């Protein structure tokens, strides 16, 4: 998966929380070992697209936080955000 052009429209329309919930269900199904091979391949591909979408959403949120940092006295300044 590369850029947003490879993320299907139905996934691109999901919120971070919706995409993460779907990704968690896919991981559970794959870990169970109960899915047939073709289904496993299909849901793995969807999972990869969901992961890329979630990463894109997180990066956008990180950039917003970086831009909006309240300083002393309510002044707004730009500082890098730390996510550990």
Image (cartoon, rainbow, N blue to C red):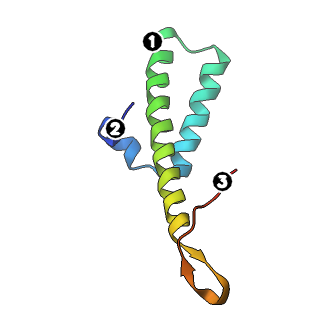
Tell me the quadrant of the picture where the N terminus can be found: top left
Q: Which residue is mark 3?
A: 83
x and y percentages locating residue 40 in the rendered image = 51, 17
Choose mark 1 or mark 3, whichever is in front: 3
CA separation, marks 1 and 3?
A: 37 Å
Indicate which disc, 2 or 3, sits on the residue closer to the N terminus: 2
Q: Is residue 18 above or below residue 81?
A: above
CA separation, marks 2 and 3?
A: 28 Å
Q: How many marks?
A: 3
Crowding at mark 3 (Cα within 10 Å: few <14, some 14-19, many 20+):
few
x and y percentages locating residue 57 in the rendered image = 48, 51
Q: Quadrant of residue 30?
A: top right
Indicate which disc, 1 or 3, sits on the residue closer to the N terminus: 1
What element does badge 1 sit on?
helix
Q: Is residue 33 above or below residue 58?
A: above
Indicate which disc, 1 or 2, sits on the residue closer to the N terminus: 2
x and y percentages locating residue 10 in the rendered image = 36, 42
Kindly identify which numbered label has been placed on residue 8: 2
- For the residue pair 62 and 22, the one nearer the viewer reads as 62
Q: Residue at x 63, y 80 (%)?
A: 71
- For the residue pair 32 and 60, the one nearer the viewer reads as 60
Q: Residue at x 46, y 16 (%)?
A: 41
Q: Quadrant of residue 34?
A: top right
Q: Residue at x 34, y 42 (%)?
A: 4
């Amino acid at each position: 998966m590369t850029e947003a052009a490879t993320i299907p429209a139905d996934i691109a329309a999901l919120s971070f929380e919706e995409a993460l919930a779907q990704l968690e269900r896919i991981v559970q199904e794959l870990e169970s070992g109960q899915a047939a091979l073709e289904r496993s391949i299909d849901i793995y591909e969807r999972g990869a697209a969901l992961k890329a979408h979630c990463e894109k959403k997180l990066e956008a949120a990180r950039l917003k936080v970086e831009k909006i940092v309240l300083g002393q006295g309510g002044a707004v300044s730009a500082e890098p955000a730390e996510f550990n």
